[in-house]
Image (cartoon, grey):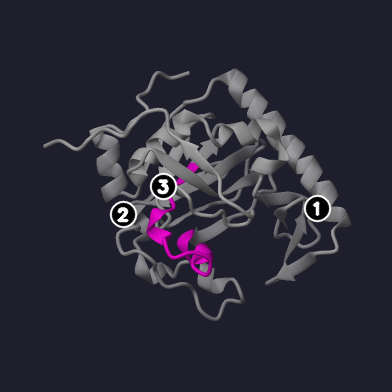
Amino acid sequence: MSQQPLCLSPAELLAWEEDGFFVREAVFTDAELETFRAAAERVVVGADRAARVSAETYAIDGNRYAEGRGSTIQWEHAEGSETLRVVEPFHHLDAALDRLIEDPRIVDPICEILGGDRVALFTDKLNLKRPGEGSRFQWHQDSPYWGHFCDHLDQLPNVMVTLDDASEENGCFRVVRGSHREGLLPGKEGQGVLGPLFTDERYFDVSAQVPAVVPAGSLVFFSPHTVHGSEPNHSERQRRALVVTYQPADKRMFKVPGTRNITGTRRAAAPAT
C-alpha cells in the first residue's frame, strides 16, 4: 500500500477548490484489489439473478432497468443486451465491499473535505465497462440526479475506486477541470426523460476535460458538481469502478432507509492561524 497521508495536502486542497477533483494513485494493494474484484463479480451475479426474476423491470428512453435485492440495476444500452452496466447501491450485497465503505483511506480525506470527524454514507454504485461492450456515458453532474431528494447538494463528495487499470482505450473516467465552480448547470432539453440529467455542453468547457488514466487501486475524489463522463471501452480489458458518495453525519441515505454514520480515524487538521 502506498504510504500517503490520510489528511489532505495543500496541493489536494487547492485542486479540490480550483479543479473540483484530485487523485491518489495505487492506494490499495494487489491482494486487496483481488478481494474487491471478486466481491464485485459476486454482486453482479446476484444482481443479474435478481433482475431476471424482478417484477419491477422497466425502460426509460429505451434503456432497461430493474429493481432487485434493494438495488437499481441497469443493463448496457445496446438493444437486447444482457450485460449489466450499473448496480446502485452495492454495499449491502457483499461484506467485503461493505467494509470498504468505512476504510479510513477513503473516509479520512472525506471527513476533511466536509469539515468534521464523522460523515454519513449517501449512496454507492458499481460501474461496469466490459471489454468491447462498455458504452459511453454522456457528460453530466451527479447533483441534478439527487436534487429531488436532498437540499445539501454542495455537500456530497464522491470517491471513485478503480478496480482495474484505467486507460483511454478502455473508457477511463473523464472529469472537466473547474466545471464545479458554477454549481448546478443546465441539462439538455428535448432529449427524452433523462435529457435534463445530462449537462448541456454550452455551459462548460469540454476542452478542459482530463482523462483519469490511473492504475488499479487508485482513488479519484470529485465534487458533486464536477462534470464527468466516459467514452466506450474499445479494449479487451475490464474497466470496473466503485463510486461512493458521502455527506455530513446524521443525514439519511439516498436509496436505503436509515442513516449510516462513519467516524474518521484522524481529526481534520486545524486551519492555520
* Number of residues whose C-alpha sits closer than 10 Å to that of mark 1, classed few (under 14), some (14–19) or many (20 or more): some
Crowd band around label 3 with a 10 angstrom C-alpha radius: few (<14), some (14–19), many (20+)? many
Q: Which span of residues is magenta-colored?
A: 142-159
Q: Nearer the viewer, residue 48 or 214?
A: 48
Q: Is residue 14 above or below residue 152?
A: above
Q: Quadrant of residue 72?
A: bottom right
| N-term-proximal mark, 3 vs 2 | 2
Where is the C terminus found, in terms of image quarters? top left
Kindly check if marks 3 and 1 are in contact, taking CB atoms under 8 A apart as contact: no
Q: Are marks 2 and 1 in contact (CB under 8 Å)?
A: no
Label 2 sits on a secondary structure element that is loop
Report the disc number at residue 134: none
Could you tell me which residue is drawn at 71 percent across and 36 percent down?
Answer: 94
Tell me, yes or no, if residue 260 can be seen here. Answer: yes
Query: Dividing the picture into quarters, in which one does residue 6 lie?
Result: top left
Q: Could you tell me how far apart the alpha carbons at marks 2 and 1 are, in whole angstroms? A: 37 Å
| Residue 222, numbered label | 3
Viewed as shown, does residue 67 lie left or right of 202?
right
Residue for badge 2 = 178
Q: Amino acid at mark 2?
A: Gly
The residue at which mark 1 appears reads as: 82
Q: Are marks 3 and 2 in contact (CB under 8 Å)?
A: no
Location of residue 172 in the rendering, given as x and y in whole percent from the top left corner: 52, 43
**What kind of residue is marked 1?**
Glu
